[in-house]
Amino acid sequence: MTDALTPQECLDRAKMHERLASTTADASARVMHQAMASEFRRRAQAGASSPAQASGGPVVEMFQPAQ
């Protein structure tokens, strides 16, 4: 992800990831796209002008969905 995105660009990317999540049959890819959509929506709401806060850890952690 780049840090120099406008709120509208973040919303556009969130919508793109939501579309990708809804059309993939791969469970791990779907989880990743949902996480990316959530992150872009969060950035859009935060104004997208400042970089994401560095916590020293990953922004998104992957997990195995329950089967």
Image (cartoon, rainbow, N blue to C red):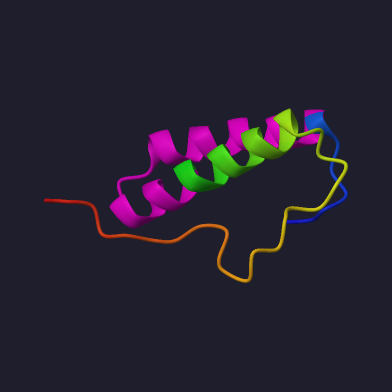
Quadrant position of the N terminus in the picture? bottom right
Image position of 41 (left or right of 44) = left
Q: Residue at 64% of width from left, 36% of height from top?
A: 42
60 sits left or right of 41 in the view:
left
Res 6 → quadrant: top right
Q: Quarter-wise, where is residue 46 in the image?
A: top right
Residue 28 position (above or below residue 47): below
Quick one: 46 or 34, which is closer to the camera?
Answer: 46
Q: Image point 30% across, 46% down: which residue?
A: 25
Q: Is residue 35 above or below residue 61?
A: above
> Is 4 placed left or right of 1 in the picture?
right
Name the chief secondary structure element in magenta.
helix
* Residue 58 located left or right of residue 63: right
- Identify the residue at the far front of this view: 55
Q: Give whichever of 64, 18 is nearer the camera.
A: 64
Q: State the residue at coordinates (44%, 61%).
A: 61
At which x and y percent is residue 66? 16, 51
Q: Position of residue 54 (x, y in %)?
A: 71, 63
- Residue 15 counted in the magenta span: yes
Res. 44 image quadrant: top right
The residue that appears at 80% across and 31% down in the rendered structure is: 7
Q: Considering only vertical position in the picture, is 59 above or below 5? A: below
Point out residue 13 in the picture as x, y percentages from the top left corner. 67, 38
Task: Give the magenta part as a residue range.
Answer: 8-33
